[in-house]
Amino acid sequence: MILPLMTALLIAGASPEAETYAAEAQARMLAGQGLPRDFRRQLAALDPVDRFAVVIWLRRSGLLTGPAIPIEAMLAPTRRPEGTAP
């Protein structure tokens, strides 16, 4: 009950992509899994504002531990996978 509410509050106003990423991360956590190995690449596909919201949510939920993500990576322009529309 609290986790979905926390997700909704922290990701409120974010893009649909950020909401989807947070929902998928939440499902992984509830299934006892961690973040995928390529989570940094997935974060890079989000706009910087959404990236911040998702990283804050990941930190507060306990999914993202360890060293901080460099500010340069957080503010970098969006890098969408090839073949996808902006």
Image: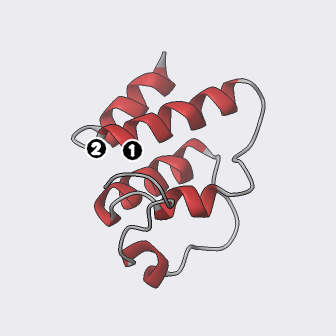
Q: Nearer the viewer, residue 60 or 82?
A: 82
Q: Position of residue 10 (x, y in %)?
A: 34, 41
The label number, if any, that marks residue 18 in the structure image: 1
- Give percent across and percent down for residue 70: 52, 81
Using a 10 Å C-alpha cutoff, classify the residue at mark 1 as few (fewer than 14 neighbours), some (14 to 19) or many (20 or more): many
Whether residue 5 sits left or right of residue 15 in the image: it is: right
Residue appearing at x 70%, y 66% in the figure: 66
Image x and y of residue 25, in percent:
59, 37
Q: Residue at x 31, y 35 (%)?
A: 9
- Given the current orientation, which residue lies at the most extreme right position? 32
Asked whether the residues under the numbered discs 2 and 1 touch, taking CB atoms below 8 Å apart as contact, a structural biologist would say yes
Type of amino acid at the residue the image marks with label 1: Ala
Q: Position of residue 53 (x, y in %)?
A: 37, 53
Left or right: where 86 falls relative to 44: left
Is the residue 72 above or below the residue 26 in the image?
below
Q: Callout 2, which amino acid?
A: Ser
Q: Quadrant of the C terminus?
A: bottom left
